[in-house]
Image (tube, rainbow, N blue to C red):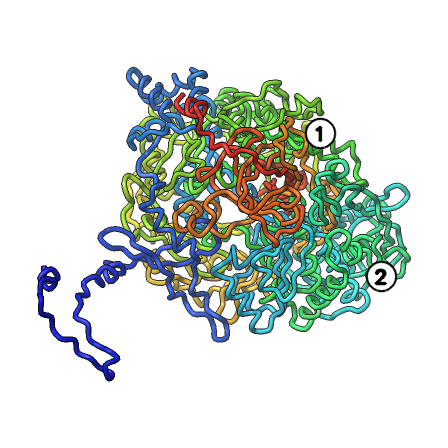
Amino acid sequence: MTDFIDQLRFLTPARQTFSRGWGSTDTQPRGWEDAYRSRWQHDRVVRSTHGVNCTGSCSWKIYVKNGIVTWETQQTDYPRNRPGLPDHEPRGCPRGASYSWYMYGPNRIKHPLARASLVRAWRQHRKALPPVAAWQAMMADRELVRSYQRERGLGGLVRISWEEANDIIAAANIHTARTHGPDRIVGFSPIPAMSMVSYAAGTRYLSLIGGAALSFYDWYCDLPPASPQVWGEQTDVSESADWYASGYLILWGSNVPQTRTPDAHFMAEARYRGTKVVAVTPDYAEVTKFGDEWLHPRQGTDAALALAMGHVILNEFHIQRQDPYFTDYCRRFTDMPQLVLLEAKDGAWVPGRFLRAADLPGAGGEGNNPQWKTLVVDEATGDLAIPQGSAGFRWGQEENGQPGPDQGKWSLRPETSGGQELHPLLSLENTRDDLLEVLFPCFESGEGGADENQGGGRQGPSPQQKGSGQGIRRILRRFVPVKRVQTTTGEAYVATVFDLNAAQYGIDRGYGDGAASYDDATTPNTPAWQEAITGVPRAQVIRIAREFAANAAATKGRSMVIMGAGLNHWYHMDMSYRAIIAMLLLCGCVGQPGGGWAHYVGQEKLRPQAGWQPLAFATDWNRPARQMNATSFFYAHTDQWRYETVSPSDLLSPLADRSRFTGSMIDFNVRAERMGWLPSVPQLNANPLHVAAQARQTGMEVSDYVVSRLQSGELRFASEDPDSPESFPRNMFVWRSNLLGASGKGHEYFLKHLLGTRNGLMRGDIGTTGAPKPEEVVWRPQAPEGKLDLLVTLDFRMSSTCLYSDIVLPTATFYEKNDLNTTDMHPFIHPFTVAVEPAWEARSDWDIFKGLAKRFSELCPGWLGQEEDVVGTPILHDTAGELAQPDGPLDWRKGECAPLPGRTMPNFTVVARDYPRTYERFTSLGPLLAERGNGTKGISWPTWPEIERLKAFNGTTDSATGSARARIETDLDAAEVILSLAPETNGAVAVRAWQALSRKTGGDLARLAQGRADERMTHGDLQTQPRRVITSPTWSGIESARTTYCASYTNVHEGVPWRTLTGRQQFYQDHEWMRAFGVGFCTWRPPLNLGSHGQGRPVAPNGHPELVLNFITPHQKWGIHSSYGDNLLMLTLSRGGPTVWLSEKDATRLGVADNDWIEAFNSNGALAARAVVSQRVPEGMSMMYHAQEKTLNVPGAEANKRRGLHNSVTRVVPNPVHMIGGYAQLSYGFNYYGTVGSNRDEFVTVRKMAQVDWLEGPQERQETKA
């Protein structure tokens, strides 16, 4: 009103002037400024973070006003680093700063949703039947099931109540467990470190009812198999602050500024400090701008480049002269001095397995595990010696509960088994008994190989590889110095790994068989040889290798390689990684601050792992949990195996006995399951609840019953007939994941076979091509469509996976729940905190699964009671079982050995389920922690003090058994369980854990945590400030003010062995399958021809030119996986829809201008996108940034009239060497080792679109309504 009256005044006050008239006062009203002031007003600030698997793990201030989140900014109160080391803060990126848009945006899921046709059928049946009976009746009508399966992805989701949603899901789970088996219920959720409680909510429910948790790290292809192979560790790497300590940085296939944004400052600061930075990327990526030099090998050829660098380092720093530091490091911390038996082959010799104590007369005096104790030559005496630290010393240290002769000898002390001082000999060059010709496999690009490309340029691999893309296989002949030894079978020849490795690298040692010079282009692994493959000038390779090694020699190992998805997503990813790791080992870098490897793909570091595992897999109530490697699961149950064009025989070494390696990829997977190497879900062709009951009726032990029926053929592994309805997975949960929009490689196969809905698959299976059928698997002429009866997704936004789901449950956002978050990039743990209550009808993941557990328990009576469940588990790493198969693969089905659970086949354990008490068990801490203790990675410790503390802290709940148990009612209670039980967050537990490891190694390791023994972190502590975790034996580095965290620190500086066969870092993999497939030593393997180019149904020309290009999917700038990319802020910054990047030259050939619509297709499917034409992309490559949603501005492709996404043109091909188990570090572990879902060897045909069709015509509308 005052402003209005002022406007009516005729006379106004005179303006006062100042500064000699150049300024004057203004009486205009300033109320408009309040809008800006109020924009930044807030009622409170809450600490939280984001759980999107970005590895950032950044702490944020969440501003709340009137019960609504208004915005977020970065926290700046991380604990300070030591003087001279930059701090971690501020951490964050534009993507995280846009998150609050989701909370009130249009794609927020506000209510439970379900497929309308499913709801109609459910309600109709519920009129006359109780919930479980209603679902049973629906499942009996398979045409009804097919009717709603066919509508998946076509819309039709309607709002339902939480009560109705829980009724449907609980009834489906009960019917499935009772009729088909609990192992037909599976769940997929990735990367628990990004929100541990939310992950644990789903897996705890599944584990209590006997469902299976699917792995993720291997399926995502974030798992580098080279890490388990070399170190026996899933992944352990340096924190990003350790980059600053490096003297030489190679950024190899890791686009740090774009994908590790919060940590990139350490790399830039290291460079300004004087560290040389070398960028290795095939395209001109953002990281390239930070490099002092740029190496741009053709994509997929990184192993050749690294092998050439290793050739230079080995030649100049180990052969021509011996750097004292490098020599000492390799002698003490690698398998270089270990002796390898040579086997006769075609008039020459080939490397066999490691020489073991069991090979010696009298087993070398070793009574405990002599098959797993390796040997060296003692430099002082020239005699054979058994060094401490190999896998044989790790297990069996106690006899009848008392310390045995091997107690404390799992150690890297330079001592023999008997305690004498030991100086292993690296090379037999000066003490050799003979010089033998040894054969090595060689895989080279043949005609149309990696040095040619249909796309019309020098860059990139070609789809036209010899055979199956493996090029020309030939045999290399090298001379190697050897020693004669007497074994139990007579005289034998042995060589050191060092001498064999030098021969493999083609080093000239004066035997007339090595490379004459670095310019020798005919000898593999030389700089000139790699130049023809990678395109990188040999002179640059030689110089970079020398600089890298010289810096390591001068700084005692402070040379580092940062690696990422650019390398690990190729089929032969372990060859690329092992070649780079070999460089680091030759230079003594691993385990040294500022040195070593730094693999960053996925937020894998679940720091309080030991505290989280009992909660997540309900091992406080039942052991073991049912787990499955996702790659094998999806390969089998999306029927991608039916379309396989890659044969294992195409991958074999020319030195292999091909008669022992027949069959298809699925055959090898089945054999691996049968021999106890890989898990199997579903397990058998029978309900495991029924199997246990039948065994009891016969009076046999359940395990004996299963073995006998498997032998007779009355029982079969489900994987032997995956297309039988008996073998189908039936119910599936997806939470914290966008499986069908991000990680579902072979997207169209998922749609056709797993979901049974419309799809864009453009090929027939091998039944239509006349290709050989599998040997171990039943072939059914008609492939099933629609294996899943129910797909349930939890999400806060409408993702591609939600569109295909039967039920969609609204979950809380990151600012509406309590949880925990850690990463490998920094040493802190910090919380998610409830800033506001979940909006609309959303609930936290913990509350969703808790509510489901309650309804499940209520509906169980009359259907499920106290049941016995037969759980099959593979032979696991970090257990004594990993020593099960010293003689390698023996198949009991073929009569090669007896079927012995846990030795030659899976373990079969009876787990008691109490289904009506599922809710009670879900919400309370079970008795097994007090009875058996807790542990991880092969050690265990008592944990009863923490259980008593949790009872006091969380309160107790009365159990049906009458005992009070710690309550886990809320997500906050669950977080406290993790923090109390984990050595990383409870100092007393850390000391106990180190004491347990000390008993194995014989050293005093508890001192590493003693100074923080009184610390106990709570969720409230973390809300105040992020906390630095406590040093724990779960990990191989230390948390210390004097040094940044680096992997393998305790191995190198405390003498703790690596968890490998030799106890050392291994250049050599001696398993029979590794040798048969030519990867015993690291070697160059060309990119694989997956057979998806030119093998599908013909695609009609559209009048535009076509080009075959390599198709890769790096991580994007405007999103983290599929998150953020669909919110308005990021859409405004990006092009707002799917894009594919092309080189300027390829675009010219195609007649494509920037922003034109193009399509990419192959026999797997097709996609449409806008072209981004750029100089940064090399010829022969097309890039589609990962996880661009199908929900956003996506037209149909002309090739198949379907909307596709990046995974529409991909398909999974497993690698047999990733199936190995029962062999020390080559043993299965959940997300540790197993088949991996690679995707970068793929090729697509690209062309400009003649017509853009948004698929909104009458036919599409009609199908949507149907």
Q: Nearer the viewer, residue 172 or 1062?
A: 172
Would you name the residue on which mark 1 appears?
A: 663
- Residue pushed farthest bottom? 20
Would you say residue 706 is visible in this rendering? yes
Query: Whole-percent x and y of residue 30?
Result: 19, 65
Left or right of residue 719: residue 209: left
Query: Whole-percent x and y of residue 359?
Result: 77, 47
Q: Amino acid at mark 2?
A: Ser
Q: Check the image and report above or below for 594 versus 757.
A: below
Label 2 sits on a secondary structure element that is: loop
Counting the numbered discs, the total is 2
Q: Earlier in the sequence, mark 2 or mark 1?
A: 2
Q: Residues within 10 Å of mark 1 (few under 14, many from 20)?
A: some
Q: CA distance from mark 2 to mark 1?
A: 42 Å
Left or right of residue 742: residue 651: right
Query: Whole-percent x and y of residue 223?
Result: 58, 47
Would you say residue 417 is visible in this rendering? no
Residues tagged 2 and 1 counted as in contact (Cβ below 8 A): no
> Image point 76% across, 54% down: which residue?
530
Left or right of residue 273: residue 1080: right
Would you name the residue on which mark 2 appears?
A: 517
Which quadrant of the figure contains the C terminus?
A: top left
